[in-house]
Amino acid sequence: MSRSAVGYAVLVACGLVAPFLLYPIFLMQALCFALFACAFNLLIGYTGLLSFGHAAFLGMAGYMMGLSVKQWGLPPEVGLLVGTATSAFLGYLIGSLAIRRQGIYFAMITLALAQMLYFFCLQAKFTGGEDGLQGVPRGHLLGFISLADDRALYYLVFAIFLLGFWIIHRTIHSPFGQVLTAIRENEPRALSLGYDVDKYKLLAFVISAGLSGLAGSTKTLVLGFETLTDVHWHMSGEVVLMTLLGGMGTVLGPVVGAFIVKTLENRIGEFGELLAAHTGVEWFKTIGDSVTIVTGLIFVICVLAFRRGIVGELTALFRKPRP
Amino acid sequence: MKRKLISILVGMALATAPLTPVFAQAKAAGAPKLSDGVVRIGVLTDMSGLYSDLGGAGSVLAAKMAIDDFKAAEKGKAFPIELVSADHQNKADVGAQKAREWYDTQGVDMVTDVLNSAVALAVTKVTAEKKRIMIDTGAASTRLTNEDCTPYTVHYVYDTYALANGTGNAIVKQGGKTWFFLTADYAFGHSLEADTSNVVKAGGGQVLGAVRHPLNASDFSSFLLQAQASKAQVVGLANAGGDTINSIKAANEFGLTKTQTLAGLLVFITDIHSLTLQVAQGMMLTDGWYWDQNDDARKFGKRYFEQIKKMPSMNQAGVYSAVTTYLKAIQAAGTDNSEAVMAQMKKMKINDMFAKNGYIRADGRMVHDMYLMQVKKPADSKYPWDYFTVKATIPAEEAFQPLAKSTCPLIKK
Amino acid sequence: MEIFGVPLQAMFGQLLLGLVNGSFYAMLSLGLAVIFGLLNIINFTHGAVYMMGAYGAYILMSAFGIGYWPALVLAPLAVGVVGMVIERTMLRWLYKLDHLYGLLLTFGLTLVLEGLFRSVYGVSGQPYPVPDLLRGATDVGFMTLPNYRAWVVVASLGVCLATWYVIERTRLGAYLRAGTENPRLVQAFGINVPLMITLTYGFGVALAAFAGVLAAPVIQVNPLMGSNLIIVVFAVVVIGGMGSILGSIVTGLGLGIIEGLTKVYYPEASSTVVFVIMALVLMVRPAGLFGREK
């Protein structure tokens, strides 16, 4: 067995044991965001496209999933499919419009279209606007496996995460993925070599959107509700942060980034107390209220000094310098 | 490859190391609910947003005072009680997640305040799922005791029906027959607009139109223009907190108050304090409690004022009363098991500085007298926070929606 | 008289309000366009510095008792200095990299700035009084217009036109434009290009802060006032043409008016209309209505 396979096996084993050690709801949330970040990374890390509107895919899928399970009474696995399909379709629409431009214009278009979607969600009746879509039942998987227990649901979520991750892994390490990397490195060259660059970009966009949708639908299943927070552009910014922090263009970077950011958000109050206790500076106690400040600082530091992200930097550190 | 593996593992370790505190708590959650020997109360409120004056740190203080007073009354025989608090930032997802985490990992038994109807509706679902108790003092939507009622929810202080009944009726009787609404676009605003419209129509009036504004809107000018264009006699403000304050200020700025009457459907004493009597004088409002209404209330008000330099709103006074009632119910029932405590609370008569002859109905509605107030003119105010004249007392039975009309599935018809 | 079922009075009222909003859009997008057009930086902090300008005025008043008129000058100066510090210490390192890093950095800075003000002041707004000279309202027939809002339109238009004039018609402006097209050459002529860039960034930021001071008496001074606006302002700049000064002024005003119209006929769409227009413009004329393809 190759070394990387062993590595992955170890991680999977950790994942299987985790719900007995840690709060399952938190783990499931982190996994959903990890999948979201991985899907996003496919676009920025491997195709070189910065989408600033990915929250649209996360949120819309969540809403559609909630709607199908709550209003239409569909079983959860069908609901997940509905959510994923919605996002993939949205990805196709938004992607086709945005791909025509490059660089910053691409990012601006995705931002604008996502913002349109946000206002649509704000107004639409079925989303519940500011109240959110509440009371999404967990139901029974395949008709008989009850998902009411947090641990049972965790294994489903973990399986979904592994599936999504595997898809991304296969995509990256395939000829298709190689072309994407070529496009990122030097688009005009790829074009001159005869590749239909736009088609590749669009396909990558759709895959990324679809998997983000899968993450969003799963999150709605776990939490039982969906709100406007998931379609707000702050969420789009958050996924950029997770990917940047973890390491753009690395396979596991986004997972690491997602876990760190989510842990930060949850535990920052305690960090603050810890810091206050050690340094005696009272102000640290108020950090708990300032998740945004810390998030912003991480962004700034990452962009200025830490562009390869955690996994990127660690990998570089361990690489032996060539003689 | 090995290096990559190591880097990945280090990364994951970095990510999960801070989670160990959660580890310790998750284990505690497995222990039996007769709560690890402690009664934990959570105040879930808006700490820094547009509703922070009505609840926020004031609610936490009120809860603390209630706990201290209870302990003093029991002279050391009281069971251990702990208080936690959190900011839900007016977001339903933040509130629901916080409540869930409290229930799962910190053994919280009862959650109170929960102002903001959207958050309340989300938290009530989680509370019912986890079989704890929510005594909501801050939210207004009648849905909490109708279609969204649960056996674990108590709606304590006021709701949109009581507000509509009080203020709406009073203004219609004074001659305000045509109305236009400026509504906060979420559960609370819709609820208040609907209930008041019913009252207006029942009183022979007409609703000429409504405009929805986003929560925490900064600029009301275009909405007020529409209100002016409608030529309605009364402009009903179906919003609260910062939004109400801004609407009133803007209405004055645009000269709306010269030709139309402003009806603040939900106004707290803290709002009047921000607006000043100069601006708010003459306004009619419905309130559940006023610090100057009797001796007990005055005593509480002054004690509270010493700590936080503001007089309590009906929400904060309500938190005090709710926590006291809850603790007394545990004392009487001998357990903090939710079903037993709920049953006990529904049997109790609530007589304290907050309410006289109050009681909790089968649908979770705490019924008590409401008061129709009018804001004093600056000349008539003799001392700080002397803002209201009590125009009428609306007896409990009349103030709230009759039990027979409730759509709560818990009630046997 | 009615047009499409809406009384003329109501429509004019909304249009006038739209003009007021449009002046804010114009001022903000002007600063953004100056920074992008001349420096190639996507300045996400524009919303945050707008907010800081408003807070600057508030702090000047509450802590130092300095009134509105001095604040109109002092606050933008102070915030402009902050902007220059940011440019010198952080943005400078990113010029060689992809534009997108600048966007991400400024996004992070926005979070920090908003978070800081939020932790000090909370999310609910601080009131700021209208200056005495501009109090009261005038009945213009179809609505009562508060005098202050009329002043806002006048002030913003004045500043916008002055800026346009300086950049497009004076020598200093010519240096600036040359400096961004070909910094090496201009530097070879002896002009201190990095200093110019820093000053320009500071100026763009000061413009936003000025808009903030103008806004303080109108809306509540709260930490989130910028983040609500920033995306709309981006859209305005993209529609107008990312390097074009005139484009952002015209588009900003135009958008304010279109929004006002939308509020009359179809209020639910008033927040989305700008994005629809932006998407359309990007499809048809990606450089923007007045922009030049770089």
Image (cartoon, coloured by chain):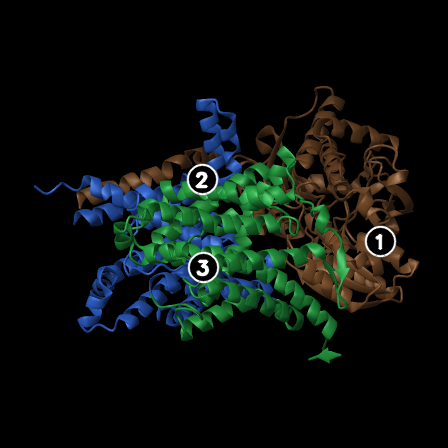
Chain colours: A blue, B brown, C green
Q: Chain of mark 2?
A: A
Badge 3 and badge 2 in a common chain = yes
Residue at numbered disc 2:
A294
Indicate the secondary structure of the residue bearing disc 2: helix
Residue B3, label in figure: none
Q: Nearer the viewer, residue A40 or B40?
A: A40
Measure how far apart labels 3 and 1 are at the Cα level.
43 Å
Indicate the secondary structure of the residue bearing disc 3: helix
Residue A58, label in figure: 3
| CB contact under 8 Å: marks 3 and 2 | no
Residue drawn at x 44%, y 52% is C44
Q: Chain of mark 3?
A: A
Measure how far apart labels 3 and 2 are at the Cα level.
24 Å
Which amino acid type is marked by label 3?
A: Leu
Residue farthest left in this picture: A323
Which amino acid type is marked by label 1?
A: Thr
In the image: residue B215, left or right of residue B397: left
Q: Nearer the viewer, residue B215 or A260?
A: B215
Residue at numbered disc 1:
B167
Within 10 Å of the Cα at label 3, are there few (<14), some (14-19), or many (20+) other Cα atoms?
many
Badge 2 and badge 1 in a common chain = no
Q: Chain of mark 1?
A: B
Residue B181 x %, y %: 76, 62
Indicate the secondary structure of the residue bearing disc 1: helix
Within 10 Å of the Cα at label 2, are there few (<14), some (14-19), or many (20+) other Cα atoms?
many
Which amino acid type is marked by label 2?
A: Val
Measure how far apart labels 2 and 1 are at the Cα level.
45 Å
Q: Does the image show residue C231?
A: no
Residue A11 x %, y %: 29, 45
Residue farthest top in this picture: B76
